[in-house]
Image: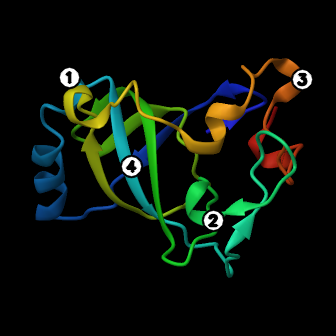
Amino acid sequence: GVLGGEASDGSLDFLAQGSDKERIALALQDLEGFEYIWVISYLHMNEGWSPRVTPPRGPRKKRGLFATRAPHRPNHIGMSACRLTGVDHAAGRVLVRGLDLLDGTPVLDVKPYVPYCDSFPSARAGWLDELDTPDESQRDRLGYWPPPPHLGQ
């Protein structure tokens, strides 16, 4: 995840056994050639959701849930883009940097980030386009800062 404004290293561990372990190792082949991946997850700790939320960036103003990246959603599905830093086929482990998930969050799928179909550089970003370029004083305001002690600083 991102801790104190810096991307942290982490891993995605496939918990396969027996012949599934070999199949996962094969499924991970060729992934190391990608710089970024999408991680699709089940946000298992969500307890309810609200149709309007206050995002951590910008003015303290409520926005429609689907116009934000708030994790508390009606369907509990999360999607994160993160940097791929390594693949250990034998261990069934994908090494990443900047994944914004809690330890133990179930991962449903991993897909490569493909710039020609996943990037739209000139796309409008709604209300976010109205914000000034953020500086250090405009960091995201998170309700759980500082992070829990077990995550370190």
Residue drawn at x 82%, y 47% is: 142
Task: Indicate which disc, 1 or 3, sits on the residue closer to the N terminus.
Answer: 1
Rounded to the nearest whole Å, what is the CA distance between mark 1 and mark 3? 37 Å
* Image quarter (top left, top right, bottom left or bottom right) of the C terminus: top right
* Picture disc at residue 137: 3
| Crowd class of label 4 (few under 14; some 14 to 19; many from 20; radius 10 Å) | many
User: Which callout, 2 or 3, points to the residue nearer the camera?
Assistant: 2
Task: Judge whether 87 appears above or below 69 on screen.
Answer: above
Q: Is 80 displayed left or right of 129 in the figure?
A: left
What amino acid type is highlighted by mark number 3? Answer: Ser
Quadrant hosting residue 93: top left
- Residue 98 visible in this rendered orientation of the protein: yes
Q: Is 129 displayed left or right of 28 in the figure?
A: right
- Residue 103 visible in this rendered orientation of the protein: no
Residue at the spot of label 4:
39
* Picture disc at residue 65: 2
What is the secondary structure assignment of the residue under circle 4? Answer: strand
Q: Position of residue 21 (x, y in %)?
A: 19, 56
* Image quarter (top left, top right, bottom left or bottom right) of the N terminus: top right
* Residues marked 4 and 1 touching at CB (< 8 Å): no
* Residues marked 2 and 3 touching at CB (< 8 Å): no
| Crowd class of label 2 (few under 14; some 14 to 19; many from 20; radius 10 Å) | some
What amino acid type is highlighted by mark number 4? Answer: Val
What is the secondary structure assignment of the residue under circle 2? Answer: helix
Task: Indicate which disc, 2 or 3, sits on the residue closer to the N terminus.
Answer: 2
Rounded to the nearest whole Å, what is the CA distance between mark 2 and mark 1? 35 Å
Residue drawn at x 64%, y 68% is: 72
Rounded to the nearest whole Å, what is the CA distance between mark 2 and mark 3? 25 Å
Q: Position of residue 101 (x, y in %)?
A: 57, 51
Task: Indicate which disc, 2 or 1, sits on the residue closer to the N terminus.
Answer: 1
Quadrant hosting residue 51: bottom right
What is the secondary structure assignment of the residue under circle 1? Answer: helix
